[in-house]
Image (cartoon, rainbow, N blue to C red):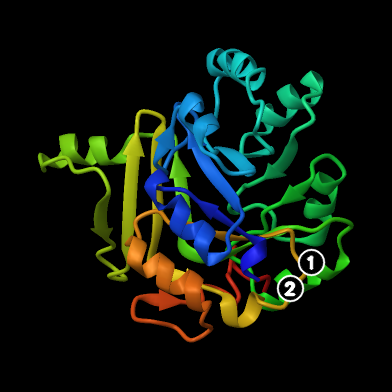
Amino acid sequence: MISKILIYVSAIENIDDYRKAGVSAFLFGLDGYCVGYNTYSLDTIKKVNVSNKYILLNRVIDCKDIDKLKNVLTQLDGIKGIVFEDIGVYEVVKKMNLGLELILFQNHFATNKDSVSFWLERVDSVFLSNEITYEELKKIVDSVSKKVCVHLYGYNQVMYSRRLLLTNWSLEFNIPYKDKNIIEDKGTHIKFRVMENEYGTVMYSENIFNGVKYLKDLDVLYYYVNTMLIDHEKIMKFLNGLNDSLSEGEDIGFLEKETIYKLKER
């Protein structure tokens, strides 16, 4: 299982520890093209001495920045692939014929076999949604034409907004601004971990998702480990054990409980 992990590198100095644990695929956020992740310059990423390097582009990209991206894409020697959210990235990359792996990563959309199959005709893999049950995940994994990616460990992304929500709240309610903040819903008392930069705001789940118990036997391309906002020692304890029992502050998300996206028909 460890050989199929794709790990997000939130701190480059931790890579040697990940490699010693058996991880061989690494995901790096690219400066200017990510929200909710620590990011690096392309030069910094290219200097990292690992073979399976992927670049994350997870923000909505406007026309001006798409033009800048075209120049960046011509410099990706040594990069294995791109993990992206904005479909505009796909449209640009396919015209450039760069020979890079393309993995679509839209947190909330890959929820059924038909939509996943549509994209697998166009890209190399797709991240399945973190909001569907194990049975739904397994049905998709077993029926599509290519291997997909699933979330395995880390805070799951709840939402992404192009708005600067922390800034807006700070100004509206006259409260001190704090990046990487924790907010609480007054009704449910559920807490969210919030990160903001100039490109928008991302909210992460209250608890760390740990899907090992259910997902360890799936035949996937990659199991995704998101290290953001988690202590390095906790990440290493997970990688070295891959335990299917939950530790304090962990849960299994929606693997056992169906998400209700809309009111049921009467």
Query: Type of residue at label 1?
Result: Val
Percent coordinates x, y for residue 137 in the rendering: 71, 70
Which label was assigned to residue 218? 2
Residue 192 appears left or right of 78: left
Which label was assigned to residue 22? none
Residue position for label 1:
141
Query: Type of residue at label 2?
Result: Leu
Considering only vertical position in the picture, is 179 above or below 109?
Answer: above
- Nearer to us in this view, 242 or 116: 242
Q: Are marks 2 and 1 in contact (CB under 8 Å)?
A: yes
Asked if residue 203 can be seen in this view, the reply is yes
Percent coordinates x, y for residue 252 in the rendering: 51, 77
Which residue is painted at 61% across and 41% down in the image?
A: 54
Disc 1 packing (10 Å; few <14; some 14–19; many ≥20): many
Quarter of the image that includes the C terminus: bottom right
Q: Quadrant of residue 71?
A: top right
Q: Earlier in the sequence, mark 2 or mark 1?
A: 1
Quarter of the image that includes the N terminus: bottom right
Considering only vertical position in the picture, is 181 above or below 150?
Answer: above
